Image: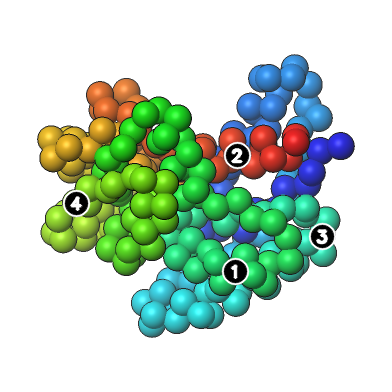
Amino acid sequence: MKKKIGIVGGLSPESTVSYYLHITRTYSERFGDYEYPEIIIYSANLERYHAWRSDNRWDLIADDLAASFQKLKNAGAEFGLIATNTMHKVYDQVAEKAGLPLINIIDETAGKAKELGLKTLGLLGTRYTMSDGFYQNRLSRFGLETVAPNPLQQEVIHKIIVEELVRGRFLDKSRQRYLDIMEELVAKGAQGVILGCTEIPLLVRQEDLSAPLLDTAIIHAEAALKYALS
């Protein structure tokens, strides 16, 4: 019996779609039928989350995420995913109140890095993901080190995410800016690069860079499919 998947999405809608498509398409490719696990998606209010984040009200974000998972549980979900990297800053607080098991995107990404034999990783994401320390601290539990872009590069990366990617805009000039930054991280010792915002893989592809890219959205979705079938 397949477990029902609950996803808090909408943070942003662009990447939420990639979760849904990966789970359903991958299942059908592997098993040759359309009996993929049932998926229940709760689309959160992104504007409200942006306001709370700007006001440093992570407590309100944690409470709202936990309440969202309670709604998913009531709708039949048996485990859940926060379909965004940044909101994993409050993962532990959410997990305590969610009422169902959650799969952590950072843990799954760390597992993939270990599987690939990577020890030092570049990290791209929102400014919160790159600079607040929660991502690096969790990766360090797995013996992984991170190489971060400099403050100016972080602002460029963040601005492209919030002004372009979450709005479905994927520009060649922005792709090149990301690639330039990633190549610099590799030159500084990164053996691979974590695409630590679930929208970045919609802009940058593995064929764009010689070093391994860790697509956190796909890694997270793959973990969900595996758990649903376990």
Mark 1 vs mark 2, CA separation in Å = 19 Å
Mark 4 vs mark 3, CA separation in Å = 41 Å
Q: Secondary structure at mark 4?
A: loop
Q: Are marks 3 and 2 in contact (CB under 8 Å)?
A: no
Mark 3, Cα crowd under 10 Å, few <14 / some 14-19 / many 20+, is some
Q: Quadrant of the C terminus?
A: top right
Name the residue: 67% across, 37% down. Answer: 225
The image quarter containing residue 126 is bottom left
Would residue 167 be seen by someone viewing this image from the given angle?
A: no
The image quarter containing residue 150 is bottom left
Tell me if residue 135 comes above or below residue 54 in the rendering.
above
| Sooner in the amino-acid sequence: mark 1 or mark 2 | 1
Q: Secondary structure at mark 2?
A: helix
Question: Where is mark 1, residue-wise?
Answer: 94
Q: Secondary structure at mark 1?
A: helix
Mark 4, Cα crowd under 10 Å, few <14 / some 14-19 / many 20+, is many
In-image side of 99 versus 223 (left or right):
right
Mark 1 vs mark 3, CA separation in Å = 18 Å
Tell me if residue 151 comes above or below residue 183 in the rendering.
below
Please name the amino acid that badge 4 sits on: Pro
Question: Where is mark 2, residue-wise?
Answer: 223
Query: Residue 183 in the image: x percent, y percent?
Result: 17, 35
Q: Nearer the viewer, mark 3 or mark 2?
A: 2
| Sooner in the amino-acid sequence: mark 4 or mark 2 | 4
Question: Where is mark 4, residue-wise?
Answer: 149
Tell me if residue 139 comes above or below residue 61 in the rendering.
above
Query: Residue 35 in the image: x percent, y percent?
Result: 81, 30
